[in-house]
Every structure is written in structure tokens, then in C-alpha cells.
Amino acid sequence: MWKNPSEYFTTTTKTFFQRHKGEVNSCAISPDYNLILTCSDDSRIYIWESKTGVLQHKVTGHKGPVKSCCFSPNGSLFASSSHDCSVRIWRVDNADCLHVLTDHCKSVETVCFSPDSTHLLSAGWDRSAILWEVKSGQNVKTFHGHTDVIQCSAFSTTGSSIATGSWDYTVRLWNLQSDGPVRILKGHRGNVSCVCFSVSGMLASGSWDKTIRVWNTNKGSLIFLLKGHCGWLRSLSFSRDGILLASTGHDKMVRLWDCEKGKCIKILKRMIDMVHTCSFSPSGTLILAGSAGLYQS
């Protein structure tokens, strides 16, 4: 377990969660840090007690690999997206499915909640992003514009905009408060595989070109170009204060970046396979990472 929100991150303990029978594609920590959510190519979603590693729920329903999962910020719900072209919204307390959302016509690669937990965004192989109302499960708006697969998405911390990253090498910023022009961020030379907002409004994007770009979203300008990974980027996560950025990829390591200085301050090398996903705990003192071969906290 990697602990301490500074350049002095150290490995204090390790807990392995190894019941999935396929690659772990996504992981999330509940807002109160009591639960850990994982999803896998085995078509299942698992909910674990974070302190004990006890499997609390084995959630089934999807008919294909589960590509993405996340908790709602209020902690009462979680969502999942799958290769079976569906998005599902579930209750945390009993793992009951509330909605099955089926407007996508191809694999759904990414799903995320708005900061107020009232809306959900999903996107994938059909090149569209769909905004859903959580309570009703209704399609509120569909966003078009990317010319290839959308692999990643994120809400800004204010909920006023969303970002989508695509295999067309671009990131698109969509304003939810107006019908103004979409801001298109260009510069990556490979598929954009992960995006993440900081509390200060910065946007980080990671790519198969092995780089991370940190953007000023107001101006659409580049703040930092971060190099160091020697494999495709798979996941990004900002600490709650927005100072640290964690990144993972195919090079089997987690890197920690200082986003005030634009430099790598720590490399965590305890993973034994490519690292598909990472997430800071709400307190910012712990990092969770999930890999192809196992799942580690």
C-alpha cells in the first residue's frame, strides 16, 4: 500500500485481490474509502472491503468484458460499462441493478459520474458520448464529433464541462452550460487513452505515444509535456489537492508527477504486469493500482 501524499511515498503493506479470472480493466475507491470496486474481462464486477480485502459482492449481469467502473461521488451508486454495448447503474448497499442503458451500438469503453451524482457520461466504439440522467436513466444529450473510438472521459470538478479522449489523437472539451464551440486539444501522436481533471481545472491526458500532456482548459494551451513512460499510458489520477498526478501504463510501473514543477518525483515498481488503472484515495494518502495479472492496493 503506497502511502503519503508527497515525494516520500513508500510501500508500507500490500494487499492482493486475486479472484478475477480476467484482466482488471478499472478500479475505484468509494468516497469513504471503505470499499474498492474492480471490473474485469471476466464480465464481473467485484466490491471489496478495503481494509480486510474481503469480497463483499460478486456482481453479474454484463454479457461481455466490463471495461470501466466508478462510484458516484455521494457513495450510494456505482456504474459500469461493457463490451456488451450497455451501461449499468447499481446500488452500492445491495448491488441491485437500477438501470440498464442501451443507447450505444458498440462496446462502451468509459463511464463517469458528474460531481453532484445526478448525471452519468458514457462513451465508446460508436464514437459518441452520451449524457444520462441517473434518476430516470434517460438519455439527456448525445455528443458527436470524434472520428474514432472514444476510450476515456471525465467531468470537470465543477461539473460544467466534460472531456473525452479518442483514438483520433485528440481530446475534446464539451461545455455543458452552453452550446458554444467545442474546444479540441491537439498534440498527441497516438490514441488518447486516459483523461483526468484536477481541482484547479487542469486537464491531464495520456496517450499511446507514451506521453502525458497537462492542459490549461481555459486557454486550450499546453502547460507541461511529461515524458518518462516507456509504454502506452493506461490511467491517470490527480490527488485531491491537484498537486500530484499518478500515471500507469504498459511499462509495469506507477509514476508520480509534481504538477507544480512538471517533473516525475517517484516511480513505484511493485507491479508484476502492465498496470491498467490507478486511483488516489479521497484523502490523497493512498494509491490503488490494478493490473493485467492481479489487483494490488
Image: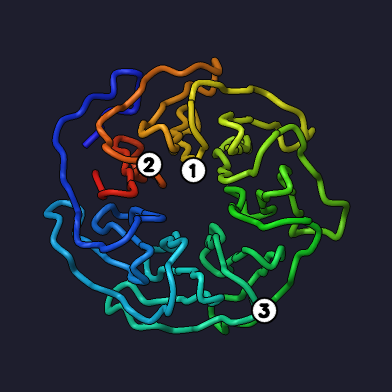
Quadrant the N terminus occupies: top left
Separation of disc 2 and disc 1 at Cα? 7 Å
Residue under pointer 3: 139
The residue mark sitting in front, 3 or 2, is 2
**Does residue 163 appear anywhere in the picture?**
no
Mark 1 packing: few (<14 Cα in 10 Å), some, or many (20+)? many
Q: Quadrant of residue 65?
A: bottom left
Say what secondary structure mark 2 lies in.
Answer: strand
Q: Is residue 64 left or right of residue 174?
A: left
Callout 3 amino acid: Asn
The relative height of residue 80 versus residue 95 in the rendered view (above or below) is above
**Does residue 12 appear anywhere in the picture?**
yes
Q: Residue at x 43, y 33 (%)?
A: 246
Residue under pointer 2: 275
Mark 3 packing: few (<14 Cα in 10 Å), some, or many (20+)? some
Separation of disc 3 and disc 1 at Cα? 28 Å
Callout 2 amino acid: Val
Q: Residue at x 46, y 76 (%)?
A: 89
Tell me the number on the disc at residue 141.
none
Q: Earlier in the sequence, mark 3 or mark 1?
A: 3
Say what secondary structure mark 3 lies in.
Answer: strand
The relative height of residue 140 versus residue 206 in the rendered view (above or below) is below
Say what secondary structure mark 1 lies in.
Answer: strand
Callout 1 amino acid: Arg
Residue under pointer 1: 234
| Residue 47, percent from left and from top | 26, 65
Q: Residue at x 60, y 65 (%)?
A: 121
